[in-house]
């Protein structure tokens, strides 16, 4: 009885002592100004009511133009608000910070087994492998494929129509292209089995994470399962084909999936089908919405600025005259598109395809006189000032 009473006495004292130590440690650090909002709810309600842009503007003016803290999605978040803040985050990638996705986003996209894993553990493709497939030498082989698909897309979806909706069609082209380059999918029915549920995921994964029937988030979770099931079928089928064919031929002449199937870690272990699925989903997310938004913005500015359109048209026609009627574009042709590339960069500066992204601190770090503790999440955001500075940097590069 005495030991039980002693335990009951020591437990609250221990908890009080731990709380005191943690509180003293927090007080010794100058944390970014801000508020955690309501208990448990944080500032989720304010974010939903105000919208992201107004919410960020309000907090920036109230707390700090450099960095402020909030509590969103159950996570302590340090929001960086200026060009210098973004430079700090990008220059310390994998030193002070690492990539991070909200748990609600991982729940919609990844297998339940990986929901609690860090993004670094989930997206296991080796950095060297990614660098190899993004080298100019590797990208050159994709240019003719992209050109052929663009021509086919325009013939089928643009030319027959007097009026077109650019953004949905850009997303269709982007997703079709990703399926072709990543997995050699060309059958419209196969692509549709991935595209329809993937659209549900992208439409709902950033909505309020309320998993109830009829909500956008619930549809995103259901869509994510359908995407994973279809990818597992494709990966399993390709692995069987790989076992029956010459591995070097497949790795050298086929798509990204075939190359990933041959990747091994330092112990010689091949990636599991779930791990491969996670990585392909990560690449689809990275390539889909942002690329479609960028294409749409470029076409918007070309429509609004006839003098810019005329110069782009003139440059493109000069390249076309040097080609045969059915001859596809090459890397060398792309290098001649100097003015067109400047138009794309200026469009990205004025209308960034992504409004920001998340990171997680892997150690305590200091910025603008404030300490962001280890384990806090961070968010970088685009602003007009950031984009102007980025544009100046691009023009001087």
Image (cartoon, rainbow, N blue to C red):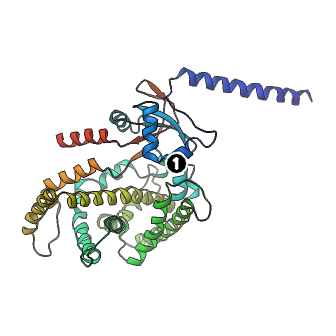
Q: Left or right of 43: which side holds 180?
A: left
Q: Residues within 10 Å of mark 1 (few under 14, many from 20)?
A: few
Figure quadrant of the C terminus: top left
Location of mark 1 (residue): 49
Residue 134 in view here: yes
Q: Position of residue 267 (x, y in %)?
A: 46, 50
Of the pair 332 and 34, the residue shown nearer to us: 34
At x 45%, y 53%, the residue is 268
Of the pair 213 and 221, the residue shown nearer to us: 213
Vertical side of 335 occupied by 39: above or below: above
Q: Position of residue 264 (x, y in %)?
A: 43, 55
Among the 4 quarters of the image, the one containing residue 210:
bottom right
Q: Position of residue 303 (x, y in %)?
A: 21, 61
At x 52%, y 68%, the residue is 226
At x 49%, y 54%, the residue is 206
Residue 96 in view here: no
Figure quadrant of the N terminus: top right
């Amino acid at each position: 009885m005495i030991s039980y009473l002693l335990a009951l006495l020591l437990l609250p004292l221990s908890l009080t002592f731990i709380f005191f130590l943690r509180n003293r440690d927090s007080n010794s650090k100058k944390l970014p100004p801000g508020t955690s909002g309501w208990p448990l709810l944080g500032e989720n309600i304010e974010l939903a009511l105000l919208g992201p842009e107004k919410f960020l503007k309000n907090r920036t003016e109230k707390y700090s133009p450099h960095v402020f803290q909030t509590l969103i999605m159950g996570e302590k978040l340090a929001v960086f608000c200026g060009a210098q803040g973004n430079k700090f985050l990008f220059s310390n990638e994998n030193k002070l910070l690492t990539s991070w996705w909200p748990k609600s986003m991982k729940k919609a996209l990844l297998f339940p087994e990986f929901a609690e894993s860090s993004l670094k553990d989930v997206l296991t493709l080796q950095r060297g492998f990614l660098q190899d497939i993004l080298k100019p030498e590797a990208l050159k082989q994709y240019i003719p494929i992209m050109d052929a698909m663009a021509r086919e897309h325009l013939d089928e979806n643009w030319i027959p129509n007097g009026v077109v909706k650019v953004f949905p069609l850009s997303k269709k082209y982007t997703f079709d292209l990703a399926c072709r380059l990543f997995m050699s999918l060309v059958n419209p029915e196969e692509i549709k089995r991935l595209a329809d549920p993937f659209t549900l995921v992208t439409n709902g994964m950033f909505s309020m994470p309320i998993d109830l029937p009829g909500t956008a988030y619930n549809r995103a979770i259901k869509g994510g399962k359908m995407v994973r099931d279809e990818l597992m079928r494709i990966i399993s089928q390709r692995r069987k084909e790989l076992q029956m064919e010459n591995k070097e031929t497949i790795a050298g002449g086929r798509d990204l999936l075939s190359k990933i199937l041959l990747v091994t870690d330092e112990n010689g272990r091949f990636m599991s089908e779930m791990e491969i699925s996670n990585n392909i989903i990560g690449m689809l997310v990275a390539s889909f919405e942002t690329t479609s938004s960028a294409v749409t913005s470029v076409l918007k500015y070309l429509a609004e600025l006839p003098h810019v359109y005329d110069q782009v048209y003139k440059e493109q026609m000069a390249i076309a005259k040097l080609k045969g009627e059915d001859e596809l574009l090459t890397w060398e042709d792309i290098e001649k598109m100097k003015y067109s590339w400047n138009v794309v960069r200026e469009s990205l500066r004025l209308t960034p395809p992504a409004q920001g992204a998340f990171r997680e601190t892997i150690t305590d770090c200091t910025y603008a006189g404030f300490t962001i503790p280890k384990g806090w999440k961070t968010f970088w955001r685009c602003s007009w000032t950031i984009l102007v500075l980025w544009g100046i940097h691009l023009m001087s590069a």
